[in-house]
């Protein structure tokens, strides 16, 4: 069993089935059990996967001090993941909406709130990283400063760039 630090996004994701794309306007569409909301985000997904594989995970992330942040934390606790390193420093917890059709096509609308503008406390990160076998830093801005610190203390760095336009993608270059 490895001890892995994960730094990544948490959000509430709402999925909604649509008849087809493009979505045709109609004032209301009844979809019985066609709309669902749950905690999500690449940080959450990786932490849950590593935990399921038997690893010990320290999850570092951010959320809002709101009902959505509380729902995410409660869900993580129920799945055996400590939430002490999830800082409630955002104005609101990020949300996404995923529209999908019967053919598997989907459209994701992602609202990161102010997550791209904040910094995670680098001293908390360093203290946690020193105890881990490796760090998994997802490509959200609050993880960016962690790259140099992890390198300086000799920790292997794993990343999930999630969405990439090319190998020369400017936003993801630090993580690559």
Image: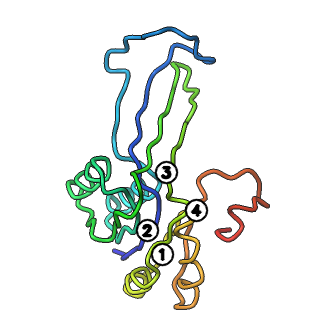
Residue 139: which numbered mark, if any?
4
In this view of the protein, which residue sits in the foreground, 13 or 64?
64
Pointer 2 or 3: first along the chain = 2
The residues bearing labels 4 and 1 have C-alpha atoms spaced at a distance of: 13 Å
- Say which quadrant the N terminus sits in: bottom left
Horizontal and vertical percent for residue 158? 55, 70
Residue 6: which numbered mark, if any?
2
Q: Please tell me whether mark 2 sits on a helix, a strand or a loop.
A: strand
The residue singled out by tag 3 in the image is: 113
Q: Residue 3 occupies which quadrant of the picture? A: bottom left
Contact check, label 4 and label 2, Cβ < 8 Å: no
Discs 2/3, front? 3
In this view of the protein, which residue sits in the foreground, 63 or 72?
63
Q: Please tell me whether mark 4 sits on a helix, a strand or a loop.
A: loop
Packing grade of label 3 (10 A; few <14, some 14-19, many >=20) is: some
The residue singled out by tag 1 in the image is: 135
The residues bearing labels 3 and 4 have C-alpha atoms spaced at a distance of: 16 Å
Most extreme residue toward the right, as rendered? 168
Residue at image point 46% right, 67% down: 7
The residues bearing labels 1 and 3 have C-alpha atoms spaced at a distance of: 25 Å
Horizontal and vertical percent for residue 120? 46, 72
Most extreme residue toward the front, as rendered? 91
- Say which quadrant the C terminus sits in: bottom right
Q: Is residue 156 above or below residue 103?
A: below
The residues bearing labels 4 and 2 have C-alpha atoms spaced at a distance of: 11 Å
Q: Is residue 46 above or below residue 17?
A: below
Contact check, label 1 and label 2, Cβ < 8 Å: yes
* Side (left or right) of 49 relative to 173: left
Packing grade of label 1 (10 A; few <14, some 14-19, many >=20) is: many
Number of dots carrying numbers: 4
Most extreme residue toward the bottom, as rendered? 153
């Amino acid at each position: 069993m490895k001890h892995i630090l994960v730094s990544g996004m948490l959000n509430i994701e709402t999925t909604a089935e649509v008849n087809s794309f493009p979505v045709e306007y109609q004032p209301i569409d009844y979809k019985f059990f066609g709309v669902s909301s749950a905690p999500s985000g690449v940080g959450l997904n990786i932490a849950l996967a590593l935990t399921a594989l038997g690893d010990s995970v320290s999850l570092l992330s951010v959320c809002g001090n709101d009902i959505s942040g509380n729902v995410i934390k409660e869900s993580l606790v129920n799945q055996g993941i400590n939430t002490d390193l999830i800082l409630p420093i955002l104005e609101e917890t990020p949300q996404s909406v995923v529209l999908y059709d019967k053919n598997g096509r989907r459209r994701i609308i992602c609202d990161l709130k102010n997550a791209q503008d904040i910094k995670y406390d680098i001293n908390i990160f360093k203290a946690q990283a020193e105890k881990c076998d490796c760090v998994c830093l997802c490509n959200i801005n609050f993880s960016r400063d962690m790259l140099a610190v992890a390198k300086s203390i000799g920790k292997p760095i794993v990343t999930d760039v999630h969405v990439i336009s090319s190998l020369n993608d400017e936003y993801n270059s630090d993580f690559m």
